[in-house]
Image: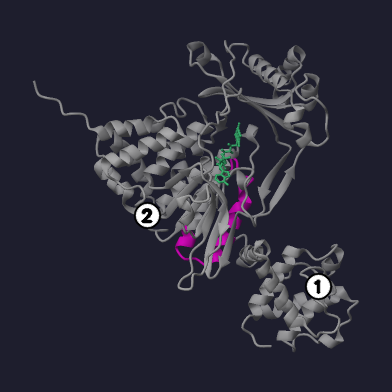
Amino acid sequence: MPQEDAPDPSHAAFDCFVQAQTCKDVLQSFSALCRLLDVDPQDHRCFYPKLKERLNYWKAKALWAKLDKRAAHPDYGQGQACVGNKCLVLGAGPCGLRTSIELALLGAKVVLLEKRETFSRNNVLHLWPYTIHDLRGLAAKKFYGRFCSGSLDHISIRQLQLILLKVVLLLGVEVHIGVEYKGLVEPQSNGKEITGWRAQLSPVDHPAGSFQFDVLISAGGGRFVPAGFRRKELRGKLAIGITANFINHHTATEAQVAEISGVARIYNQKFFQDLHTETGIDLENIVYYKDDTHYFVMTAKKKSLLNTGVLKQDHSNAETLLSPANVDQEALLRYAHDAAHFSTGRRLPHLEFACDHTGRPDVAVFDFTCMYRAENASMVRERRGKKLLVGLVGDCLVEPFWPLGTGVARGFLAAFDAAWMVRRWGLGANPVDVLAERESVYQLLSQTTPENTSKNYNAYSINPTTRYPNINLGSIKASQVTALWLIAMAMVFISDSFGRYEDLLSWCQNQTAGYKGVAVTDLTESWRSGLALCALIHHFRPKLIDFDSLDKHNSAHNNQLAFDVAEKELGISPIMSGGDMLAQGQPDRLSMVLYLTQLYNSFMGTAP
Ligand code: FAD
């Protein structure tokens, strides 16, 4: 009998990696595979080609074929478009992971930080058709056989994270789990050279703290937005969301129970009336998806939550209303259970709660009343001549309304848009042009739906024109975004050590000393009359303003004059009108710092 070849241990290790079902197992099996094949994941440029070369059997080859097809897209410039860029991505939620994949395909060195130790979210995400197509192209089915089989269009957050984590690792992204990003460390001068931007981390001595980067992508979820970005609150009518996960035993009976891909009150009055009559539960809508768990998300009416004892007391403030102290957990479990039981026609035999990462029943109540949206998607910081491009993606850019399933769909669109921005950055475009284009694209994000985005999924790439029909990449002009560069610089002054903020103040004091009616003691109130601004400009360019003719009581005129002259002669956009300076309680500190910083930059090196 011919002797069978001994099984190749790397094939078994690869199988382990592909099948791994926890974040820890993925990372451990990946390390084991790399050790066996003697490939160094830190060597991001050569890692993937070496891995392919050394793991060259049918199962692995099927995966490489998928990834190679993707990597061959011209947008990536054969993996050279961002070969000189170093990107820090914070947050290994679906959007941080998805962005990391694109940055790696562009050839950048990517380090990804995640503060949690586990991927434990059972909740299920609705996928738009393009996301399913996109994930299939990343070999999702090879990592998770049940991925969107048949007409399924959803996946649990943790499964999605596991799939994307595996792809990220194969593409040479450096992943650190259990590491929290705390803030930026500015470039420092050590006498000989200036270091790059770095991150302040917890644990403080983590090696990733020495990584120097020129791109920071924040994908930290709804609650995490890096310093410098402002958020708009979108406040709607009170909407209380409840999510509940029950164990899926994967029996034939369970398999037969139909999913509810979204039923809203206006479309099925009878269903909701019957539910209310029989159980006292009053809902606006409900969704049921079958995945690793039986997952339900519903928006409940406040009155029924009070009547059924879920909410102990009524409060007009949504935060107090839904605070843990005001929620009766037992009543909440009953409410979620009964809603699930009724809406599935009582056909799910054992509605037993699945556990969350703390071991408690996985039921939660959320406030959808107010959601946040970042005012801008991007920013450039500059310090000691080192520029840093900062971008937001996912929930920290636009918080989704879960029952509509917009989260990961818009999240991935933003991930591609952010990657396109990094591509232009890597190719050396002017920073304000990069920002202007990114902000032009961002304007569309909140209106995107499966209907108004391109249906040609095969053509989707990081280039926004492949996804958004009729997009105008130049709708925002470079002149409108200079502030995103400069605000970041002003933020440096503000958030900085007292010393540098003081530098700006003392510079202003020195230049305006001796001017009649001017006494600069701060960066707000002292500027109200407009005389200080006029004095500052007069000091450097005396011909532009007739200072002696100014009346200190005519603040609106003085401020307007300074703004107009600075705009016309120095190209500095006004921060507000002269009248606005009076209308406000006092000039806004951030705006003043920004404006004065621009004057400083303009006059720096100019002899008066
Ligand atoms: P997230 O998935 O929130 O990921 C952000 C990641 O960043 C997290 O893993 C977080 O630990 C990490 N992070 C945050 N700050 C730091 C830091 N400083 N340093 C390092 N890492 C950091 N959507 C639905 O459609 N249906 C649902 O039922 C649903 N349930 C949800 C339940 C919870 C608890 C949360 C938080 C979100 C839920 N969402 C739900 C929203 C959905 O998860 C997101 O839209 C989707 O996951 C894409 O989000 P993301 O990647 O931008 O952020």
Quick one: label 1 or label 2, which is nearer the N terminus?
2
**Residue 384 point in image, percent of width and height:** 54, 70
Nearest to the observer: residue 126 or residue 389: 389
Residue furthest to the right in view is 553
Q: In this view, does 294 lie above or below 385?
A: above
Residue 153 seen: yes
**Residue 352 point in image, percent of width and height:** 58, 15
Whether residue 131 sits left or right of residue 536 in the image: it is: left
Nearest to the observer: residue 334 or residue 546: 334
Residue positioned 66% across, 69% down in the render: 499
Q: Name the residue under label 1.
A: 527
Nearest to the observer: residue 452 or residue 481: 481
Residue positioned 34% across, 53% down in the render: 45
Q: Under tag 2, what secondary structure?
A: helix
Nearest to the observer: residue 446 or residue 41: 41
Q: Which of marks 1 and 2 is in front?
A: 1
- Residue 79: assigned label: 2
Give how far apart the Cα atoms at labels 1 and 2 are.
51 Å
Residue span colored magenta: 423-452
Amino acid type at circle 1 is: Trp
| Image-quadrant location for residue 29 | top left
Residue furthest to the left in view is 1
Q: In which quarter of the image is the N terminus?
A: top left
Q: Is residue 525 above or below residue 66?
A: below
Q: Quadrant of the C terminus?
A: bottom right
**Residue 595 point in image, percent of width and height:** 71, 70
Asked if disc 1 and disc 2 are in contact, CB closer than 8 Å, the reply is no
Residue positioned 60% across, 57% down in the render: 439
Ligand 1, seen in the image, is in the quarter at: top right
